[in-house]
Image (tube, coloured by chain):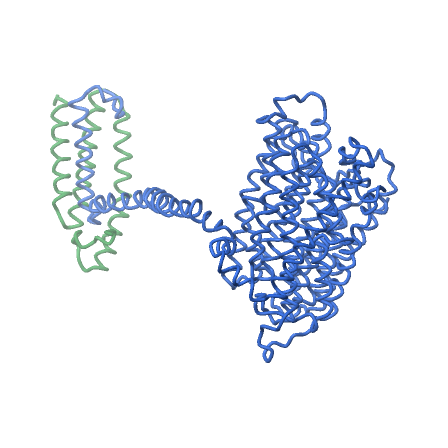
Chain colours: A blue, B green
Amino acid sequence: MPILDHLWIIPLLPLLGSAINGLLGGKWPNKIVNSVALGATGLSFACALEAVREFTQLPQDQIPWIQHYFSWIAAGSFRAGFDLQMDQLTVVMLMVVTGVGFLIHIYSTGYMAHEGGYYRFFSYLNLFMFFMLILVMAANYVLLFVGWEGVGLCSYLLIGFYFLRKSASDAGKKAFIVNRIGDFGFMLGMFLLFRTFGTLDFKGVFDAASGPSWGHEAWGQFGTLTIACLLLFMGATGKSAQLPLYVWLPDAMEGPTPVSALIHAATMVTAGVYVVARSHILFVHSETAMLVVAIVGCATAFFAATIGLVQTDIKKVLAYSTVSQLGYMFLACGVGAFSAGIFHLMTHAFFKALLFLAAGSVIHAMGGEQDMRKMGGLSTKIKYTYWTMLIAAMAIAGIPPLAGFFSKDAILFSAFQIEGGHPLYAVGLLTALLTSFYMFRLIFLTFFGKPRYDEHHVHVHEPPWSMLGPLVVLAILSVTGAWLAAPALWGGTDYFASFLAPIFGMPQSVEAMSETAAHQLEIILAIVAVASALIGLGVAYWLYIRQPEKPEQLAKSMKPVYNTLLNKYYVDELYAAVIIKPLMWISTNVLWKGVDVAGIDGTVNGIASGAKSVGDVVRHTQSGNTRSYAVWVVIGALVIIAVIFFWPASAPAVGMVR
Amino acid sequence: MVPTSYYLVLSAILFGLGVVAFVFKRNVITIFMSIELMLNAVNLAFVAFSQARHQSDGQVFVLFVIVVAAAEAAVGLGIIILTARNRQSLNVERVDLLKL
C-alpha cells in the first residue's frame, strides 16, 4: 500500500509546486512555471488515482483508512493530529478535486498566457489545491478547518488577482469578510462538539454521536447537538454561498475565469456540502437541523435561479446558477439523501466547470466582452466551444441522458418521498424549469441570432487546444459522468449510491416502499422533470429565437418585477443599509473618533503633554548658576534643621540620634 | 574652662558667615575661601564635642576633614585656574553652561 501509507504526498505536491513557483517563478519563462504547476497537480492526480486503486482493495474493516502523521496541537485533554483519512466520500471528493483541478490547470495555461503575474496565478492555484486536498482528506474537524480557511485565503487572493482594479480587490475582501461570518459559526460549532464529545476526530465524534446515550435534550429543537449542527451549517452557508450569506459569490466573478471554474463552481464552494455530508451522522439525528438545511437549500435554489433569469453578464448568470445548484445539494442533504447530494456535487463539478471554462473561451474569443447583449451568432465561429457549452447547458438543465438529469432526478425523487416533502419538491421542480430557461437563454443569446458586436473590430477566434482539450474532456464527463447511477431508473443498482452506502447507508425510502411502486414513481417524476426542463427550453427558444423583441416588451410590462430581479432583490443594498452602514458609523464615530482618537490617543498624548508642562515649570530651578544651587542646598539644610527642632518626633526618621 | 556652648556658638557664627559669603559673593576664590571657612567651623564643633565628651573620634574626624579639604583645594584651585584662563574672569555668574 505505498500511497495509502503516505497519503500526505497527495496534498504536499501542490504545496511544493506553489512554493517553487511562488518563490522562484518570478523570473522564469511561462513554460517552466507551467511545467512546475502542471507537474505538481498532475502527479497529485496520479497519486490520488493510485490511492483510490489501493483503497478499493482494502478489506472492509480497515475503512475509514486513517493515517496519523504527527500531533499538531496537544493542550490538556485536547488533541488535534495531522491525520488524513480515506473513505468512500473522500474518494469521490479526491477525484473531483484533483481531476477537475488538473483539467483547469491545463486550461489556465492557455487562458492566462497573456496575463501578467503568470507565476503568481499558478502559485495561488497550486496553493488552493493543497488546502482543498487537506480539507477533503482531514480526519478531524480542526485539520478540516485549516483547509477550510486556506481555500478561503486562496479564494481571496485569486478573486483579487487583478488587484489594480478596485472592484476586484473589493470583491476579494467581500468574499473574505462574508466567509468570516460563516467561519465564526463553524468555530462555535467545533467548540460545542468538543465540549460535548471531548474530541474533534471524525471517528470519535461520530462513534459517540451514534451511541444511544443522547436523548431529546441533545437532539431536540434547542438541544446542544442540534445547535452544533446548525452552527456547522452556518459555516457551510458562508462557504457554499447559501442564503443569507450568498452575496459574495456573484461578486467573486471578478477573478479570472479559470478561478471561477475551479474555486467558485467545482470545488471550494462545495466544501459546505461536503462538511454537512461528512457530519451526516450528527445531522440525521436532529430533525430541526435537517429541516433548516432542506429549507435553506431549497429557498436558495429558487431565489438564485430567479435572479439568474435576467442577468446580462455571462459569468453572473453562471454564478447565480452555481448558488442555485448548491441549494439543490443542500436540499438533498436536508432530505437525507446525502449520496444524491454528493452525486450532484460531482456532476455539477463537471458541467459547471465546463460552463465556466466555455464561458471563458467565449470571453477570450470576444476579446474580453462579458455582456451577452453584445454577443450573438457565435455558434458557427467557435464550434468546439459552442458544442461543449451546449452539452453542459443540457446537462445542467436536466435533459437525459446527461449527467445533470440523473443527479437532479435523484434529489427531486428524495425530496418527494420524505414526509411533508412535497412543497420542497414543487419548488425544486420549478427551479429546474427556471434553470433550464436561463441556461438556454444564455446559449441562445450568446451563440444564436445576429451578431450584436462590432464585427470589424472583434476578431472572433477559437482558443488554443490547451483550452479546448479540457473542454472536450469535461464535456465527455458531463455526458457520461452519471451513468454509474443510471440503472437505478430501470430498477437496477445505483452504483454510485452503493459505493457510498458504507457511509450514508442506502436510501431508506426505497426500502420502505415496494420496489415496483418506487420505480414507477421514480419514472413518473423523471418524466415530469424532463418535461419541466423542456418547457424551460421551449420558453427560452420562443423568447430569444422566435421573437427576439419579446423579452424587452416583457421587461417593460413587468418593470417592478424585472427591476427587482435585475437588482438581485436589493439584497446588497439591504445589507449595506442594515449592517454595513451602522457598522461604518460605529467604527467611524465611536471606535475611531471616540475610543481611538479621544480615548487612547488622548491618554497617551495627555500623559506626554502633562509631563512636558510640568517640566516647563520645574526646569527653571536648573539655572546653571552654581550659587542658585547653593541656595537650594542651604534652604534644604535649614528645612531639615527646622523639622528636627520643631517636630522632635521626626528625628529618628531623618536619621538623627539625640 | 570654657563651656562647650561657647565653642559651638563660635562654630555656628563662622559657618553662617561661610554660608552667607558662599551665596552672595561672586568671586570664585572668595567662594572657595568661604567653603574652607565652613569646613573649619565644622571642625571646631567636632573638636569641642570631642573634648566635652572625652572621646577621641571627633578629633580623628577632624584630621580626615583637613585631608579632604587639602585634596579639594588642590582640585578646586586647578579648576579655578582653568576657568579663569578660558574666560578671563573669576565671576561665577558667567560660568553657567550647564543651563538648559
Q: Could you say where residue A498 lies in the image, as x and y percent from the top left? A: 82, 40
> Residue A324: image x %, image y %?
62, 49
Q: Quadrant of the C terminus of chain A?
A: top left
The location of residue A89, given as percent across then percent down, is 75, 42
Q: Which image quadrant is residue A457 in?
A: bottom right
Above or below, comparing residue A559 to residue A621 in the picture: below
Which quadrant of the structure image shows residue A159?
Answer: bottom right
Quarter in which the N terminus of chain A is drawn = top right
Q: Residue furthest bottom?
A: A456
Q: Position of residue A262 (x, y in %)?
A: 67, 55
Residue A202 visible at all: yes
Front-most of residues A241 and A331: A331
Residue A236 appears left or right of A644: right
Exactly how many numbered labels are in the figure? Answer: 0
Q: Position of B6 compared to A140: left or right? A: left
Please name whichever residue, A234 or A616, is drawn nearer the observer in this view of the structure.
A234
In the image shown, does A644 or A96 lie closer to the viewer?
Answer: A96
Residue A23 visible in image = no
Q: Is residue A2 above or below residue A201?
A: below
